[in-house]
Amino acid sequence: MRSLALNLGRVMASLVLSTGALLAQDGGNTSKGFDAQFKIRGGLGLQTDDHLARRVMGFGLDFGWGLDFGRFGLEVGYQYKPGSQYIQPFSSTAAGATDPFPQSNPNLGITSVDSRKNTLEGMTARLSFQRDFNADWGWQGGVQLGGSRFKQEYIGDVTAKDFSYEDTYQGTPVKSTLGVSPYVGVIYHVNNDSHLEFNLIDIGYKSINFVHHPGSAIVAGNPNQPGSHLVYAGDTLEESSRHLLHLEIGYAFHF
């Protein structure tokens, strides 16, 4: 986490210095009328869930209208939050099936495995309001919609201790929802043509998790046909609503 924050800080500092060298700094007040901004951002989660990484990345094109009392903006962009490969513990065994990991000899069935990876990404829309405190600083708040397409990739192979069954399963289920993520933050005007943003955002999404009970009956697919997609009785997808707080830093180029 520390190395990511340092690298992100160096990138932002380089952008500030390079832009400041080209443009004279003259207050950076919010302009009136129509304007457009291209934004890039990165963030770190104060918490994490579903084996997702703490980091999140995004960018967007923001169109706004400045008035005497502030600026209203609409941004269209993209957000990506990666995940790490992990081993999923097995669910309870199906009724009447042999336990692949009996307590009496946990080494039996050791070849069984269930490996997974989750990611969160998608197109976003941000509605915002910005108002300046003074020539250098301002605040903003708004809501992000989208960026909440949750995908789980899983592959499993479970063998009974007495070899009475061998379950093989794989899939990539996806859950897309209109995630609602409110945010608030402060703005530092580097110059008339760029600014820095420091936001606190609550990223909302709905996660899914595939559940398989070892030893279940096959209800679809042909186990004797290589590559056949097998479906087992009792296989389900669990859904959970999530909200994860993130600290976010961004840089905006004004047009």
Image (cartoon, grey):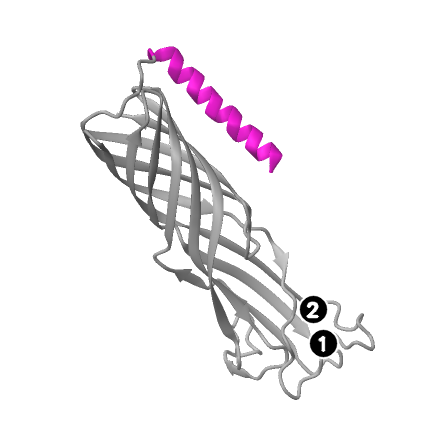
Dominant secondary structure of the magenta stretch?
A: helix
Residue at (29%, 19%) from the top-left corner?
A: 192
Q: Relative to 106, is 57 above or below?
A: above
Q: Relative to 176, is 33 above or below?
A: above
Residue at (49%, 25%) from the top-left corner?
A: 11
The range drawn in magenta is 1-24
**Which of 158 and 203 lies nearest the eye of the viewer?**
203
Is-magenta flag for residue 12? yes
The span from disc 2 to disc 1 (Cα, nearest Å) is 8 Å
Residue 104, quarter of the rendered image: bottom right
Three-letter residue code for mark 2 = Ser
**Which of 60 and 135 lies nearest the eye of the viewer?**
135
Circle 2 residues within 10 Å: few <14, some 14–19, many ≥20: some
Instruction: Determine whether, in the image, residue 192 is placed left or right of residue 54.
Output: left
Is the N terminus in the top left, top right, bottom left or bottom right quadrant?
A: top right
Tag 1 residue: 100
In the rendered structure, are the residues bearing label 2 and label 1 in contact, judged by CB atoms less than 8 Å apart?
yes
Residue 178 image position (x, y, % from top left): 34, 57
Residue at (62%, 75%) from the top-left corner?
A: 167
Residue 226, quarter of the rendered image: bottom right
Circle 1 residues within 10 Å: few <14, some 14–19, many ≥20: many
Three-letter residue code for mark 1 = Pro
Instruction: Determine whether, in the image, residue 202 is placed left or right of residue 92.
Output: left
Where disc 2 sits, the SS reads loop
**Which of 30 and 177 lies nearest the eye of the viewer?**
30
Task: Determine which of the numbered discs, if any, sits on residue 112 in the image.
Answer: 2
